[in-house]
Image: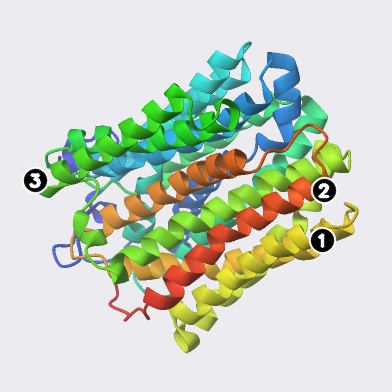
Amino acid sequence: MNTAAAPDATPPSVAATADPGSGQPRPVDGSHSLQSGPLLIASAVLVLMQFMLVVDTTIVNVALPDVGRELGFSTAGLTWVITSYALVFGGFILLSGKIGATIGPRRALLLGAVVFVTASVAAGLAQNPGVLLTARAVQGLGAALAAPSVLVLLTAINPPGPRRARALALYILATGSGAASGLLLGGILTGAFGWRSVMFVNVPIGAIVVLGTLRFVSVIPGQRQSLDVGGAVTSTITMTGLVFGFTSAAADGWTSPLVLASLVVAGLSALALVVIERRHPHPVVPLSFFSTMRRAAPLLAMMAVPAGQLGFLYYTTLVTQRALGYTPLQTGLALLPFTAGLILTNQLTPRLLPRYGERVVGSTGMVGLVLGAAGMAFALTGPATIAVLLLPSALLGLGAGLTFAPATGVILNQAPPGEVGAAASLTQGLQQLGGALGLAILTTVVTIDNEARSGDLAVAFLATAAFPATALLLFSVWGRRVQPTGQL
């Protein structure tokens, strides 16, 4: 697809094409001719889109009690309000990365934003659990369409060097802080306007993204290539089967026919995925990414980190709202140390990486994640108070800010030439899958009743710490220092 074919084409001076050396987009005239003002606005629009997508993984957390009471959810069913979004997001992001490469990332982002906003309206109007869960799943589909294009467009419009580094720092900050910010924003909106407002807030934000993209973001033409529909279908079935099986096991037990069937289907689908990807010329899951532990370990680590982070935030809302009786707004405020810690270390990380390298900085961050979750477990062995939340939340935030940039840099820089986009999509997909699967495993292993006893919650946080501990082992042993190449 060429630029002329796009109805929203921009002047050739700001259009882009693929760089045959790196597989990354670059301006067709070889110069980054966008003025700094419009370029800054374009980057801000893209970062805002990423922030909105990540926020929606947790913005409903503090509203769950109100959602359950009004729509009649069971306790186990409420987890699907979170999981349905993350599952579809992670399941389809692999295929959507290829779709974006075919139709052009700008078009894919706009399509995803429109789908996301439309589904948000439907979720806000839902009158029963089925409609809400369906709308949340469609939100995940819109997020999957848009997310890979955000990173591709950011690197296309920002030249290598300080400008691109700043843009990526903002992207990582939006990704890392979005989950905690979702809790705060969800608390404010739920307390002031009710739970439906956490869905409707996406409408004005989405409108800004769409209008800003149309006005300021360059068109990048697509590249014709065969879509790996078989790989997308089998990868989605695998992920869905795993998450559904673990989530259902919490309520029905491991011997339930439905649970066993889900896990068997997931296993068979995973085998089919391997067979399909070995034969497809443009696989959604390039098996070369898993050919050695040096390549696979950072990807697996980035799957485990969100599992621990989402588990920590989920159980913290149970501590505040059930054990301490906090309002949704108070819950969001209680997690401000997490956000503050993440912002602080996110700003320091670009200075630390050239000196200490990705493995040292990333491993240090993962140590902080482990200490945050384990520290909360230790604190809850006594009476639950607001004081016990502050230090563990801060430790988790500090660790998150040190983790995402080094791990992402290692993954993208060791991707084979021409497959950086696939690596970005796979990284985002594994992050969403990790969050959904991790929460499903935790709610299966640890049962929290309505009384939310401190002892039970302490066990839950200790189990949560196992995920970043696994990530630490993988990354510290097999992570390696990135050799700058001028690419992402």
Give the structural element (helix, strand or loop) at label 2: helix
**Residue type highlighted by circle 3:** Arg
Give how far apart the Cα atoms at labels 2 and 1 are. 9 Å
Instruction: Report the residue at 68% width, 49% height from top.
Output: 460
Give above or below for 457 relative to 469. Answer: above
Q: Residue 10: percent from the left, percent from the top?
A: 29, 44
Give how far apart the Cα atoms at labels 2 and 3 are. 52 Å
Q: Is residue 343 visible?
A: no
Between label 1 and label 3, give the one nearer the viewer. 1
**Residue type highlighted by circle 1:** Ala
Residue carrying label 2:
454
Residue carrying label 3:
279
Q: Residue 284: percent from the left, percent from the top?
A: 23, 45
What colouring does the structure picture have?
rainbow
Circle 3 crowding by C-alpha within 10 Å: few under 14, some 14–19, many from 20: few
Instruction: Report the residue at 19% width, 60% height from top.
Output: 288
Sequence order check: which comes first, mark 2 or mark 1? Answer: 1
Residues tagged 2 and 1 counted as in contact (Cβ below 8 A)? no
Q: Residue 208: percent from the left, percent from the top?
A: 53, 38
Q: Is residue 187 visible?
A: yes
Q: Is residue 10 left or right of residue 442?
A: left
**Residue type highlighted by circle 2:** Ser
Residue 85's mark? none
Residue carrying label 1:
379
